[in-house]
Image (spheres, coloured by chain):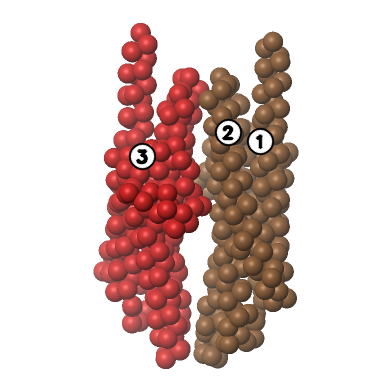
Chain colours: A red, B brown
Amino acid sequence: MAEHISKQFDMELETIRTRVLQMGGLVEQQIVSAIDALMTGNIAKFDKVITEDSLVNAMEVSIDDECLHIIARRQLTASDLRIVFTVIKAITDLERIGDEAQKIARIGKSIYQSERYQVPRFREINKLAEVALMMLRRALDAFARLDATAALELAEEDLRLDDEFDAEVRQLITFMMEDPRTISMSIDTLFISKAIERIGDHSKNIAEYVVYLVKGKDIRHTTLEDMKRETPGE
Amino acid sequence: MAEHISKQFDMELETIRTRVLQMGGLVEQQIVSAIDALMTGNIAKFDKVITEDSLVNAMEVSIDDECLHIIARRQLTASDLRIVFTVIKAITDLERIGDEAQKIARIGKSIYQSERYQVPRFREINKLAEVALMMLRRALDAFARLDATAALELAEEDLRLDDEFDAEVRQLITFMMEDPRTISMSIDTLFISKAIERIGDHSKNIAEYVVYLVKGKDIRHTTLEDMKRETPGE
């Protein structure tokens, strides 16, 4: 009977884990679509991203709900509780990555619909987005494989993304100074870059929750130097 | 004995609630200090905000920890569980408000330390910050008094803050076009405004968790129109 309860519980946890990965897959698709629409000026695709953010939101609410049901019904062990806790925290970040994808789509749509549409500088955006997407995929992969070492790599990737974002800001400033007619357009591009930079931050957060899940150790708010010092062999 | 356990549990919950409010108070103070340093160019004050963000981070980790201990030790009722869940979600937003305060301090410090420091346009920043601070105070107050109606008001305040942020962006664009030498400075101001706008978003999130706590109803991702329709008498 105890085994039966435990198997039932394992199944419930497995279902939740699967749903988190599904939610992650949807969020990833939202980013890919938003960036693709940005490159091609596909208004219908922008609209789809904007509308489908509600699916991401609904998934967060429903997974939270399942987590609460599990906690209420079962006497969880400390390690089971850590899994549920990680899910509750991580999906908040996934939902907010969805918000950023929607934001990119909104700004992109307004760029393509405005009169002032000129000289889009989306090549750099594309590069930034590739780094952010890779970070999200790694975070989800770390969650799927319960791989705590990925968090360290993601912290380094996030520094790289921040540097690339800063470089993009400096470039845009030069661009605006050379030709003030591009200011409006550049500010829009700036906000899109900012949204992508935040996707990296959220992915890093998710990876940090995975470390807590695997090691029972909270590395949130630890510096990269501290992390490296504590995991010299990894 | 049951009453004793329940009293003990009430005390634990009360302690957690108090600590959330303390964390909120610290975060509020961080914003006030960052904005004050921005108005006065007080570098020591910027540094204090930057350093003390680690206190905010530590509070999040420690409150999360207490919540997990409560869940692990006690068989919670559905409503008790809602309280703990609300705390776990709300302090993530408080911690990120702390990050935004730190971001404002970092940008402010670099503005005052740079050669290009000129014509600061901080009057509008001050106005934006007042709205965001009021939103944070209301969200904390709603949490303290378990007042679900505040969430509706906060959703409206957030629209107002978004409008004021958009107006500030348009003003900065005009400013930059009139005098391209102000571009660098204006971009810094833009990022500070963006950080303040996000403080409003996070405060709105906290108020929405309070509604869930009080009404057992999840209003996250509900439109303002839907909310009004459902609470006509409030």
Q: Chain of mark 1?
A: B
Which residue type carries mark 3?
A: Val
Q: Quadrant of the N terminus of chain A?
A: top left
Residue B17 picture quarter:
top right
Query: Which residue is disc 1 drawn over?
Result: B16
Q: Chain of mark 2?
A: B
Residue A116 location in percent, x, y? 40, 81
Nearer the observer: mark 3 or 2; the answer is 2
Query: Which residue is disc 2 drawn over?
Result: B67
Q: Chain of mark 3?
A: A
Residue A215 location in percent, x, y? 41, 38
Residue at screen point 36% across, 17% down: A6
Check disc 3 and report its element: helix, strand or loop. helix
State the CA–CA distance, disc 3 to disc 1: 28 Å
Residue B113 picture quarter:
bottom right
**In the drawing, does residue A105 fall left or right of residue B208?**
left
Q: Are marks 3 and 2 on the same chain?
A: no
Query: Which residue is disc 3 drawn over?
Result: A20
Residue at screen point 69% across, 25% down: B10
Q: Earlier in the sequence, mark 1 or mark 2?
A: 1
Which residue type carries mark 1?
A: Ile
| Closer to the camera in the image, B176 or A80 | A80
| Closer to the camera in the image, B182 or A10 | A10
Residue B89 location in percent, x, y? 54, 41
Check disc 2 and report its element: helix, strand or loop. helix
Q: Is residue A27 above or below residue B81?
A: below
Q: Are marks 1 and 2 on the same chain?
A: yes
Q: Is residue B88 above or below residue A138?
A: above
